[in-house]
Image: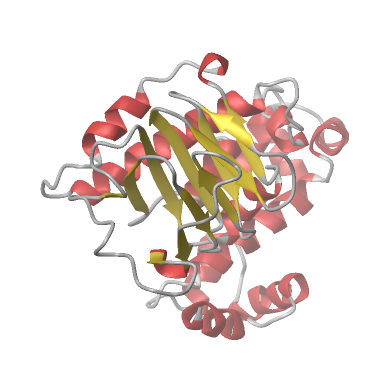
């Protein structure tokens, strides 16, 4: 597993919110659902992305916007159109005055809008759960990424458009995977762009030595790794690996491993049946006490407090 795959695995959709939106002018929707990550793909017509801060951006067919929460934003037929609907946490939809709009704008299976024959059709995918594993990926993104159709080549938008309105058995799993594929393709295309501020860990993956080391740490976090044992597996000297890893990734190998282990632990602790001892073994700590000490040093709370907070959210 490479580093990018590991981080995307943390952001993987599990029962993500997927919807086809059909609108006819004039229309404007304000999104303040505080979701950590959302994606909008335009299928037909156009739409304006309207941030609270910054300039609006027009999207046409085949264009994709990826929004990193929790800041609110809007989509509209024109930046000057006043919001007619507001999306709240839990995907609750109301008028700006608070009147429920769920039934009024329901247009069929996973379809929503103000006119079933509307000129603008968009696909909306929302990742509603934030994980520690995915946080490193989210931190590498600007508040919004806009990919134009001519910036990338992907057949996934028409496939998702066809599948989102189906109501077959297991359809939620199909949509989760399609949404993940679209996100991966879009992020890869974005990080390849010259204007993207590509994070050091992403660039380091292409290095034959450091990329291999990062993959081994991600794939086997429970191993009792040392710089020496990692270097021996790769076939390079300990000093050379430490120097090259730190230079390309921006932190030493064992610091990178500790961050990865604790992020995994934080997410595993969200599982209702996971014990501290089992989580400690999975992420490479010799005892629950060792994990608790490292966890509190990194996050400022004990694993128990973290678990309680995650369940309450």
* x and y percentages locating residue 246 in the rendered image: 85, 39
User: As displayed, is residue 14 above or below residue 141?
Assistant: below
Residue 220 seen anywhere in this rendered image of the structure: no
User: Residue 109 placed where, x, y %?
Assistant: 18, 50
Residue drawn where x is 36% and y is 40% of the image: 24
- Image colouring: secondary structure
Nearer-the-camera pick, 224 or 115 = 115
Give me the residue at 47% from left, 15% from top.
Answer: 153
Residue 137: x %, y % from top left:
63, 46
Q: What's the residue at 70%, 49% (across, down)?
A: 139
Residue 25 in picture, x, y percent from top left: 41, 40
* Badge count: 0
> Does 96 sit above or below residue 80?
below
Question: Between residues 102 and 158, which one lies in front from this camera angle?
Answer: 102
Residue 276 vs residue 85, the one in the foreground: 85
Q: What residue is shown at x 24% (from left), y 64% (from top)?
A: 103
Residue 141 falls in which quadrant of the image?
top right
Question: Horizontally, is 15 left or right of 55 in the view?
Answer: left
> In the picture provided, is 147 more to the left or to the right than 47?
right
What is the quadrant of residue 66 in the picture? top right
- Residue 295 vs 77, above or below: the answer is below
* Residue 43 seen in the current view: yes
């Amino acid at each position: 597993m490479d580093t990018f795959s590991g981080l995307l695995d943390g952001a993987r959709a599990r029962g993500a919110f997927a919807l086809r939106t059909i609108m006819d002018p004039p229309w404007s929707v304000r999104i303040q659902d505080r979701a950590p990550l959302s994606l909008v793909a335009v299928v037909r017509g156009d739409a304006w992305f309207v941030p609270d801060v910054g300039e609006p951006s027009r999207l046409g067919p085949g264009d994709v916007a990826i929004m990193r929460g929790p800041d609110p934003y809007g989509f509209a037929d024109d930046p000057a159109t006043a919001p007619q609907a507001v999306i709240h946490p839990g995907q609750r939809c109301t008028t700006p005055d608070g009147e429920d709009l769920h039934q009024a704008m329901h247009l069929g299976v996973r379809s929503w809008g103000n006119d079933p024959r509307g000129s603008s059709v968009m696909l909306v995918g929302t990742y509603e759960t934030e994980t520690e594993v995915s946080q490193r990926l989210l931190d590498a993104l600007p508040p919004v990424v806009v990919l134009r159709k001519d910036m990338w080549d992907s057949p996934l938008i028409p496939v998702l458009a066809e599948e989102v309105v189906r109501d077959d058995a297991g359809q939620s799993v199909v949509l989760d995977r399609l949404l993940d594929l679209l996100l991966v393709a879009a992020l890869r295309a974005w990080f390849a762009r010259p204007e993207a501020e590509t994070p050091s860990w992403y660039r380091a993956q292409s290095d034959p030595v450091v990329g291999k080391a990062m993959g081994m740490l991600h794939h086997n976090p429970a191993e009792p790794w040392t710089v020496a044992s990692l270097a021996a597996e790769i076939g390079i000297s300990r000093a050379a690996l430490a120097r090259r890893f730190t230079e390309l990734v921006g932190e030493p190998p064992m610091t990178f491993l500790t961050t990865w282990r604790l992020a995994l632990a934080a997410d595993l602790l969200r599982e209702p049946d996971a014990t501290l001892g089992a989580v400690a073994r999975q992420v490479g700590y010799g005892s629950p006490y060792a994990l608790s000490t490292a966890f509190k040093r990194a996050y400022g709370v004990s694993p128990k407090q973290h678990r309680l907070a995650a369940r309450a959210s």
